[in-house]
Amino acid sequence: MKPKKVLIIEDDENIAELLQLHLCEEGYEISHAAEGVGGLAMVRQGGWDALILDLMLPGIDGLEICRHARTMASYMPIVIISARSSEVHRVLGLELGADDYLAKPFSMLELVARVKALFRRQEAMTQNLMQDAGMLHIDRLAREARLRDLPLDLTPREFDLLWFFARHPDKVFSRISLLNQVWGYQHEGYEHTVNTHINRLRMKIEDNPAEPEFILTV
């Protein structure tokens, strides 16, 4: 099996060296960019299995790099590391598509553990989608979904919900958690909104919405 390729974009050389040291010990293949312009160019080259991204970078900031990475066809986990520890920056980073956010200073062991967890989650999602085989295919870039090779007519929010569930297989979420993570932290709707959208989504993807196979209620 080929080693996972991890790109680190971090302007602090000491932090970058420590990250490389700990991640190399896990068998990952590491590349490093010390500023935003070069880092964005490397992101555009593609082929990365994960991105560890600082926010405050010379040239182009990390949020812009994160935004661009999420427009690319291939999906890679993104972990933001930043001295900006405010809730606003954490929320903004996650809303732009980051999978995790660690405020500096952080434990290197914790970061490595989170990267490994993201890889496990991604592999689980891939396996689950492959088990469903030709049944369900989701194209995040085109924002299209197909069931048994037939296109699904999904509203933007239904697609967001389906994509969120696909990215987090075998996980349980409360209604308020789904409101926060799919609708956004500024959403002022009610929890029954989640029920309504999930019911509509089940009508479109389940053979029998009364006995769902894709989206289960716990």
Image (cartoon, helix red, strand yellow):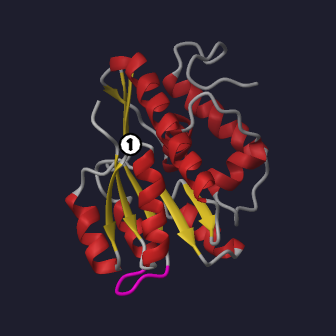
Query: Which region is colored magenta?
Result: 56-61
| Residue 169 % position (x, y) | 56, 31
Element class at badge 1: loop
Residue at 58% in and 70% down: 92
Mark 1, other Cα within 10 Å: few <14 / some 14–19 / many ≥20: few
The secondary structure that dominates the magenta segment is loop
Q: Residue furthest left?
A: 45
| Residue 123 % position (x, y) | 44, 32
Quarter in which the C terminus is drawn: top right
Q: Is residue 44 magenta?
A: no
Residue at 27% in and 35% down: 2
Q: Nearer the viewer, residue 165 or 42?
A: 42
- The residue wearing badge 1 is 27
| Residue 180 % position (x, y) | 70, 55
Residue at 43% in and 67% down: 17
Residue 183 shows in the view: yes
Left or right: 37 as drawn, with respect to 203 = left
Quarter in which the N terminus is drawn: top left
The kind of residue on which mark 1 rests is Gly
Q: Is residue 173 above or below residue 180?
A: above
| Residue 37 % position (x, y) | 28, 79
| Residue 27 position by quadrant | top left
Residue 143 shows in the view: no
Q: Nearer the viewer, residue 157 or 164?
A: 164
Q: Is residue 135 above or below residue 142?
A: above
Left or right: 186 as drawn, with respect to 71 = right
Residue at 57% in and 16% down: 213
Q: Nearer the viewer, residue 92 or 146?
A: 92
